[in-house]
């Protein structure tokens, strides 16, 4: 089970997966050159949704297809500091 966590520091938004920095996956699509955000709908949350899904699913095509819905239903609703498990992501996708 993977654990995704996000919080804010003096350097801005920080997101990890299993305590390692989460790859923003700009190689798939660059929604936000500034990187990750959450708690609202927009480009930063869209980048986070894509990065989480690409890492979790291991399928870039499926991750891109599900990004918008996951951003609206999950990422935009996250608190300022948050934690998501693989199981919670699977549940949100069903």
Image (tube, helix red, strand yellow):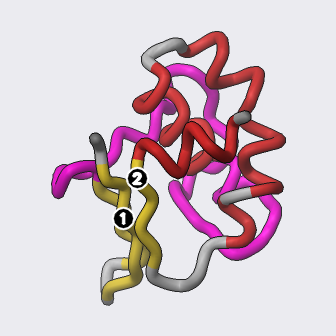
Give how far across and how far down residue 26 sits, in percent: 51, 32
The residue shown at (70%, 48%) is 46
Relative placement, left or right, of 27 versus 29 is left
Q: Residue furthest left?
A: 19
> Residue 59 colored magenta?
no
| SS at badge 2 | strand
- Is residue 61 positioned above or below 55 on the image? above
The residue nearer to you, when weighing 18 against 50, is 18
Give how far across and how far down residue 79 sits, in percent: 58, 82
- Is residue 34 positioned above or below 76 on the image? above
Question: Could you say which quadrant of the image residue 61 lies in?
Answer: top right
Range shown magenta = 17-46
Which image quadrant: the C terminus? top right
| SS at badge 1 | strand
> Residue 29 colored magenta?
yes
> Which residue has dot 2 on it?
85
Q: Decide which of tag 1 and tag 2 comes sooner along the chain.
A: 1
- Is residue 87 positioned above or below 93 on the image? below
> Which residue has dot 1 on it?
5
């Amino acid at each position: 089970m993977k654990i995704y966590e996000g919080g804010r520091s003096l350097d801005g938004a920080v997101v990890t997966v299993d305590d390692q920095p989460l790859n923003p996956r700009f190689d798939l699509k660059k929604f936000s050159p500034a990187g990750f955000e959450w708690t609202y709908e927009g480009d930063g949350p869209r980048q986070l949704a894509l990065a989480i899904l690409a890492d979790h699913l291991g399928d870039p095509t499926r991750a891109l297809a599900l990004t918008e819905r996951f951003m609206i239903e999950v990422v935009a609703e996250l608190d300022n500091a948050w934690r998501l498990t693989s199981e919670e992501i699977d549940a949100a996708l069903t």
